[in-house]
Amino acid sequence: METQKTNTPLHLEDLKRKEKVSGKVVKITLAGAFVDIGLEMPGLVHISQLQKEPVNRVEDVVQVGQTVDVWVRRVFPKKGRIELTMIEPLPLEWREIKEGMVVKGKVTRLEKYGAFVDIGAERPGLVHISELSHEYIRTPGDAISEGDEVEVKIIKVNRRRRQIKLSVKALLEKPSKAPVPEKKARNEYPKKEEEEETEEEIPTAMEIALRDAMERNHNDVDKSEKINKKSSPVNNELENILSRTLEHKVQTAAK
């Protein structure tokens, strides 16, 4: 993250939260140190704001007359009070992190389930593997690498658990889907196929009657042969007539 430049405010109203200023320690108390930053009143650095590690005595960290860099925590213009800190504030504090924000960060670690990105908050946020790309990827390394500077969208914040969920693909354009070929309408198929489907003709009543007569005659002949193997000349003649008639009808229909 970029380091803020040290400014010299002209008026109390000019001070902005997280602004970095330089000053001189003018007084030390049990509660902290007073630092002159060039205004009509000095600002107070509470003992808890001297450094990240615990402090037993203010004198162990700063001395009167020492020049120090401090950041503005809070300003109370009506009360004429300024609260300072010697601990560099985070670019993003929990109360400033909102869902839907788009921020930049640096990939600090890759795991099987996703990538951790430092966005300037108290702890890095997690980009789950499913939020790295619109395409399928086997591992986070297929889409991202440690040290990459990325732009991410904050999709969920859990302040109680100190968890931040991020997404890369939310800022990427979705790939266009391949067009699905349309099915041909029935009337677009060749007429030949339709004609072939209806080519078979329905037999006439005469043909059906002849076929039934033939079947009955064959059944009668089979029964009579079991009793008497000698065939009747009349039956043979009738069978020949019916066979020729049916054959002629079938040939005529085929033409």
Image: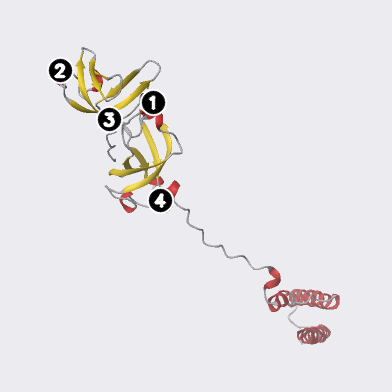
Report the residue marked by disc 1. Answer: 13
**Which scheme is used to colour this image of the protein?**
secondary structure
Please name the amino acid that badge 2 sits on: Glu
Q: How crowded is mark 1: few (under 14 residues within 10 Å), some or many (20 or more)?
A: few
Please name the amino acid that badge 4 sits on: Ser
Report the residue marked by disc 2. Answer: 59
Position above or below: 173 against 45: below
Please name the amino acid that badge 1 sits on: Glu
Q: How crowded is mark 2: few (under 14 residues within 10 Å), some or many (20 or more)?
A: some
Tell me the residue at 70%/79% (across/down): 192
Q: Nearer the viewer, residue 67 or 32?
A: 67
Please tell me whether mark 2 or mark 3 is closer to you in this view: 3
Tell me the quadrant of the picture where the N terminus can be found: top left
Image marks 1 and 4: residues in contact by CB distance under 8 Å: no
Q: Quick one: label 1 or label 4, which is nearer the N terminus?
A: 1
Report the residue marked by disc 4. Answer: 133
Counting from the top left corner in percent of width and height, residue 27 is at 20, 16
Q: Residues within 10 Å of mark 3 (few under 14, many from 20)?
A: many
Q: Quick one: label 2 or label 3, which is nearer the N terminus?
A: 3
Image marks 2 and 3: residues in contact by CB distance under 8 Å: no
Q: Quick one: label 4 or label 2, which is nearer the N terminus?
A: 2
Q: Nearer the viewer, residue 171 or 114?
A: 171
